[in-house]
Image: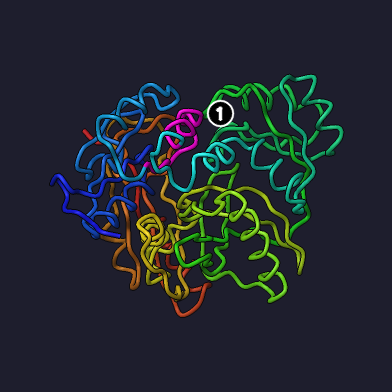
Amino acid sequence: MRIGTSLKPGATKILLLGSGELAKEVTIEAMRLGVEVIACDRYENAPAMQIAHRSYTFNMLEGKNIRRVVEKEKPDFIVPEIEAIATDTLVQLEREGWTVIPKASATRLTMDRQGIRQLAAEKLKLPTSPYRFAGSLAELKKGAKAVGFPCFVKPTMSSSGHGQSMVKNPAGLAKAWKYGIEAGRGKTGKVIVEGKINFDYEITLLTVRHKGGTSFCAPVGHIQIDGDYRESWQPHPMTKTALKKAQGIAKKVVNELCGKTGRGIFGVELFVKGDKVWFSELSPRPHDTGMVTMVSQTMSEMELHVRAILGLPIPEIPCRPGASVAIMAWKSMKNPTYEGVAEALKIRGTHIRIFGKPEVIGHRRMAVALAIGKDIKEARKKAAAAAKKVRVVNGV
């Protein structure tokens, strides 16, 4: 792998499709290795756009927009960073010789919950929660009856919990159907209804497919509320048997998605009870719960992603106790302003990362508090205390 010089004719270029907080960190890591970064998103001044070499704003569900930018910029790597993308266009671009990370087919399958769930449960025979897909309220009622109550209703294409709800009885299905269809990031016209699993905890197993093979980060424990990440920590304790099963499940599904050539980091979400492990979901890119790796690992999930993309070596991935807590804004605002950062950083071993999102509509994750400690308990306590001190208010 040869790396050119940014803004020169021989530059190595990454085109990011999606420019949120994770893409911002990917941009930083790519630039550290001399890569030229072009950031795209559906709104102006998204976090990665603020530091990329160039940026474009357009609807990424329209394939002609993606093609126009690809043909203009001629990137070495096309890197999807969000769910709502015209994946059929990525498949066609890959057939024409462009490199899509991890692969266009993997992106298409994982951007739609129906594709990845059927791959995992029906083709690979991995253990999952009971599920049904529904394209109408009548189908949802039938599916919910099959999987039982309580159940979870989710859009087949979404992120950060948008459109997801828990339903305790049949009376709540109509509301869940409306919310799932209207709030999803992509308009597939379908939802998935999942039965509840009695699990002890859930983890994200960050799995890296790279030139040298497949590597795993230490398990990331997390708390999600309505499908949206709020807190994570690493390493989450697991039995040796459960960890081995988790790694086996993750490797099986990642290898299936990557084939012989795909590469990059995957956030594999799993449910665990004792030594039992169930596959839940998968993201073919850095995962929001993995932001903890910015303090807990010598190489963050974003650096690992960039190394894998470029074909660079990934040796062992050391880990120390660390934690992250999302900092939320709970009301709409046009000029987000941050107070209490100085007070938060007085806590030893803490860091604050402000994403730079330009506005809030409803509620939004705006920053993250990170902390290290002598153990997970201490790290979580420090991260929570730091996050509590930071307030997001509407500026003048």
The residue that appears at 62% across and 59% down in the rendered structure is 250
Where are the magenta residues, as a range? 78-94
Q: Which residue is label 1 attached to? A: 184
Locate the N terminus and report the quarter of the image it occupies. Answer: bottom left
- Asked where in the image residue 359 lies, by quadrant, the reply is top left
Q: Amino acid at mark 1?
A: Gly
- In the rendered structure, the answer to whether residue 261 lies left or right of residue 68 reads right
The residue that appears at 42% across and 45% down in the rendered structure is 328
Q: Is residue 28 above or below residue 106?
A: below
Camera-side residue: 189 or 172?
189
- In the rendered structure, the answer to whether residue 331 lies left or right of residue 36 reads right
Locate the C terminus and report the quarter of the image it occupies. Answer: top left
Report x, y in % for residue 223: 58, 55
* Magenta highlight on residue 90: yes
Report x, y in % for residue 247: 63, 65
The residue that appears at 65% across and 21% down in the rendered structure is 178
Report x, y in % for residue 229: 52, 49
